[in-house]
Image (cartoon, rainbow, N blue to C red):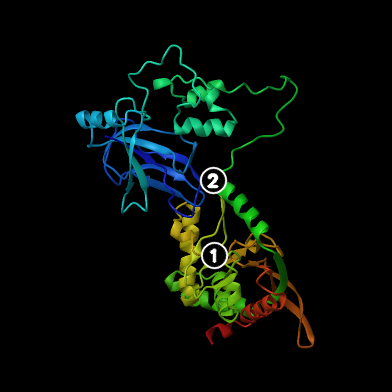
Amino acid sequence: MRYIFKFPDIGEGLDEGKIIEWYIEKGQSIQSGDALVKMETDKVVTDIPSPKSGVISARYGSIGDSIKVGSALVEIDIEGAEGDQAQAIAKEEPQKAVTESVDEEGFGGVVGTIELAGDGAYLPAGDEGISAPDQPKARKKALATPVARAIAKDLGIDINHVVGTGPAGRVTKKDIESHRPPTPQAPASSTETPRQRTEPLSQIRKTIAKNMLRSTQNTAHMAIMEEVEVSSLIAARSRLNEALMPDEIKLSYLPFIIQAIARALKKHPVLNAELDMENERIIYKDYLNLGIAMDTDDGLVVPVIHDADKKSLTQLARDIKSLADKARDRKLTLDDLRGGTFSITSYGSIGGYFAVPVIAYPQVAIFGIGRITQKPVVKGAEIVIGNLMPISMSVDHRIVDGAEVSRFVNDVLGYLNDPILLLA
């Protein structure tokens, strides 16, 4: 029996994934749970396991190809209905494959389909041992592989006008590529050199673009900017790092900022809420999961520190380092990325001062941290050199009023100006 395994939705409602690496070849035996392919999705790079044991009879897509959720990834020959049983099924429904839904427990909600094909039924398979017909007959609806249909759609080609050379006149990827009209070439010139280049969007970059657009279309952004004198915070951090040196723990400013924000969110829960316009209600979250924006070679990712309000400075420092290492090595999981209720972005580490950060919809607020700079400040009746940390905060003005966000910011800045208050 041949099992057609389709690319599953592994979470967060993704639409497609890009093939990064195949682990199997045609004709290879595999066991249930063996990794089939490494896919780059909207959120993570992850291995897709096989839900069945058997022999790989076909695989779809090459490295770099984008595969839609629900499209076939591989076909696996497994023990099951074959021979006389398959012929009996075919006689009952000669033009139709019998499909059974399969929910494989233990594989992250992976769902595939089993198709029992009989005489006269179409089942996608390899081209081995089958000669292409000399004159394929035209038909109203093309018979084609999922990959061929996806390529045709991307290129704007009507697949029903493509002559198929595969088994039973099936349209293949090669047929689509050969059907595509040649791209007009600019006249050659020995004196001109290319002045532009192109590269395909990565899955992460496409997701960033989609999420940024969704945020600006679905929220009413309002921004507030402030500065806070943090000389006391700098001194406290320095003393703690000296004390923690034997444990090889080094605190950045971020754990202090996380604790300050967590304390302030307890006082201002609307900034940790979500606006549900469809049901005309506000959803208040009784937990604080803080997303931390991190820059990687592939683009911006926002892993989440869960229950941040319950963690110490050293625990937060360990979590931040762990997530940063996983982000750099492209090992973040979906659990690392989901469930955020409020976000923090630190553009100051690169050199920014003020900014207007974009809210991670459906959250209602994001807190931005700029570069600490020495400037003259007034302390008492004297002008002294102070250390100013600029902050920028964006909120969804549909749910958060200006006065409320100002009170929240004042509370956060109070903790940062005098970090001993975090011990109260």
Which residue has dot 2 on it? 203
Q: Position of residue 258 (x, y in %)?
A: 55, 72
**Does residue 22 appear anywhere in the picture?**
yes
Counting from the top left corner in percent of width and height, residue 216 is at: 67, 58
Of residues 355 and 239, the one nearer the viewer is 355
Residue furthest out toward the top: 134
For residue 149, the mark is none
Q: CA distance from mark 1 to mark 2?
A: 20 Å
User: Residue 393: in sight, yes or no?
Assistant: no
Q: Is residue 355 left or right of residue 26?
A: right
Q: Which quadrant: the C terminus?
A: bottom right
Image vertical order of residue 416 relative to residue 296, above or below: below
Q: Residues within 10 Å of mark 2 (few under 14, many from 20)?
A: many
Residue where numbered disc 1 is placed: 291
- Quarter of the rendering containing residue 389: bottom right
Percent position of residue 337, x then y: 49, 59
In the image: residue 101, left or right of residue 302: left
| Element class at badge 1 | strand
Outermost residue on the left side: it is: 84
Identity, as a three-letter code, of the amino acid under mark 1: Gly
The quadrant in which residue 57 appears is: top left
Q: Is residue 388 left or right of residue 307?
A: right
Q: Quadrant of the N terminus?
A: top left
State the image coordinates of residue 301 (x, y, percent, origin top left): 55, 56
